[in-house]
């Protein structure tokens, strides 16, 4: 019998993981204390936008392999492998990770684990957390040594959660026994058969791989945005520079797109929590460079505001600004620490009338930024604008006809915050095209 799987916490990570585990052929029970969330997932209705997930949930539910519950008892009775996918947001008043959902999960599940099972942490945590969880589990579980812990960080990207989960780049398994390794190898047999590397590590290394990967990606993005500042000073073109660097296989072009920088629920919070944890461990100096990575990233936002201000003559007072994009990146509706909304808010505070459009993130944006105006299309957001800001590079915006948009604006000024538009096309249509790190 293949192991039966539970997934504790059915937010973005957990819902995607549960649906993908069912797709891989396992019987899966998703568990969340939020009844409304469990209800909507049981109807194949994710509460967030993720391409392909709805169809996968539908398939899992229809096949009978996938279901959702609020009951930890049911989960404990059902599961041979319990994946923990709860959130670890930034704690209030500090940069540290808030582990309260993780502790609550272990404290609720642990005392119910009466038979042998493997509890697998997937959440992003400060190094040392897995060892603490293993100790706690040993205290709580009636199964004693039979209820074991493993740490198996997740590397999925929002907007690509389904393919990233079904076909991961690598599987990192922080383990303490051969039994745990055998179980995880059975779970990931399909991707491993496709050639995905399966790396066995201790707990601390597994935890660190995750935060180190996100720190590296953030550093790469801030590196190219620092080059963009230098390009501005030197009159060079950062997009050509990035393309040339990317051809070096040792550097690579991924995560080297200059522009408005990184946001979202992961990179910004993870580098700050990583710095805090390194400080606790006496290794603060080793990650001091991440403070600069964060600072460069913040400057991308202020430089974009300045560029837009220049285009409208130095003051936003009485100006209309059309904003294309609210999500922190395309193909998702997540607005957590969104650079786009940060810029929109800043411009609004400086006196502009700002109208925002995003293909998927409108509800979230409206809820959290009620002071901004919203339009039902890119064209309506651009109507009567003195400057249009492209802040999230949705395909729909890249496909927009600059000739048609030129007809609805007051002034043909565009800031390409993601270096995603074709400058020649926009300039031919009469636009004054500007982007960071380009002349
Ligand atoms: C990131 C990592 O890429 C995942 O591997 C990881 O699993 C995830 O965090 C997590 O910890 O859960 P994600 O936040 O979904 O995934 O998004 P990315 O695609 O990495 O983009 C992050 C931000 O960087 C976005 O705001 C994006 O617009 C920006 N970015 C990305 C750039 O400014 N330039 C680039 O070249 C790439």
Image (cartoon, helix red, strand yellow):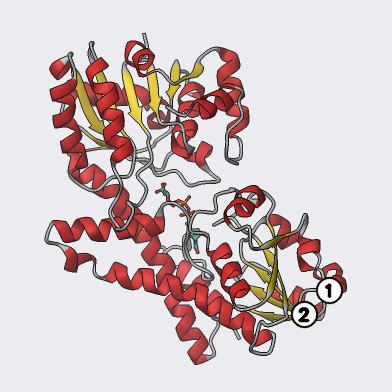
Image quarter in which the C terminus is found: bottom right
- Disc 2, SS: loop
- Badge 1 marks a residue whose secondary structure is helix
Residue 255's disc is none
Residue visible at 60% across and 51% down? 367
Residue 406, numbered circle: 1
The x and y percentages for residue 134 are 17, 31
Instruction: Indicate the position of residue 35 as horizontal and vertical percent values.
Output: 50, 25
Q: What is the tally of numbered marks visible in this picture?
A: 2
The crowding category of the residue bearing disc 1, from other C-alpha atoms within 10 Å (few below 14, some 14 to 19, many at least 20), is many
Q: Quadrant of the N terminus?
A: top left
Q: Which residue is mark 2?
A: 431
Tell me which label, 2 or 1, sits earlier in the chain.
1
Give the quarter of the image for residue 96. bottom left
Instruction: Judge from the rendering whether residue 86 lies leftward or rightward of residue 59; answer left or right.
Output: left
Is ligand 1 closer than 8 angstroms to the Cβ of mark 1? no
Of 260 and 199, the residue lying toward us: 260
Above or below residue 437? Residue 86 is above
Residue at 81% over, 65% down: 401
Q: Position of residue 169 (x, y in %)?
A: 41, 43
CA gap, disc 2 to disc 1? 7 Å
């Amino acid at each position: 019998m293949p192991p039966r799987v539970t997934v504790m916490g059915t937010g973005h990570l957990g819902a995607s993981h549960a649906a993908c585990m069912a797709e891989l052929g396992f019987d899966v029970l998703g568990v969340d204390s939020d009844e409304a969330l469990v209800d909507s997932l049981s109807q194949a209705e994710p509460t967030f936008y993720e391409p392909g997930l709805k169809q996968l949930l539908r398939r899992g539910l229809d096949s009978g392999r996938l279901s959702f519950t609020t009951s930890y008892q049911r989960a404990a009775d059902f599961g041979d492998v319990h994946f923990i996918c709860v959130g670890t947001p930034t704690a209030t008043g500090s940069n540290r990770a808030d582990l309260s959902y993780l502790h609550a999960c272990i404290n609720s599940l642990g005392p119910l684990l009466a038979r042998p099972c493997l509890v697998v942490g997937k959440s992003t945590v400060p190094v040392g957390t897995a060892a603490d969880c293993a100790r706690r589990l040993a205290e709580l579980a009636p199964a004693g040594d039979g209820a074991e812990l493993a740490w198996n960080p997740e590397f999925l990207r929002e907007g690509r959660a389904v393919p990233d989960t079904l076909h991961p780049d690598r599987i990192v398994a922080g383990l303490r026994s051969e039994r745990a390794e055998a179980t995880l190898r059975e779970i990931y047999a399909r991707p491993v058969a496709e050639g995905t590397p399966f790396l066995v590590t201790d707990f601390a290394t597994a935890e660190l791989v995750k935060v180190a990967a996100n720190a590296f990606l953030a550093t790469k993005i801030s590196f190219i945005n620092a080059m963009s500042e230098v390009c501005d000073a030197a009159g060079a073109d950062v997009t050509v520079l990035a393309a040339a660097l990317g051809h070096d296989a040792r550097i690579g072009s991924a995560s080297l797109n200059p522009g408005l920088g990184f946001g979202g629920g992961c990179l910004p919070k993870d580098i700050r929590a990583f710095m805090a944890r390194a400080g606790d461990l006496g290794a603060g100096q080793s990650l001091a460079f991440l403070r600069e990575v964060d600072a460069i990233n913040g400057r991308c936002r202020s430089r974009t505001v300045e560029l837009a201000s220049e285009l409208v003559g130095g003051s936003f007072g009485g100006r209309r600004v059309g904003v294309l994009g609210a999500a922190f990146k395309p193909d998702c509706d997540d607005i957590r620490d969104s650079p786009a909304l940060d810029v929109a808010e800043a411009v609004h505070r400086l006196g502009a009338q700002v109208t925002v459009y995003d293909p998927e993130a409108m509800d979230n944006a409206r809820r959290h930024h009620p002071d901004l105006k919203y339009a039902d299309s890119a064209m309506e957001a651009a109507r009567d604008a003195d400057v249009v800001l492209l802040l999230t590079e949705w395909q729909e915006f890249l496909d927009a006809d600059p000739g048609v948009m030129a007809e609805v604006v007051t002034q043909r000024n565009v800031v390409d915050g993601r270096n995603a538009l074709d400058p020649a096309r926009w300039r031919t249509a009469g636009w004054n095209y500007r982007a960071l790190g380009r002349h």
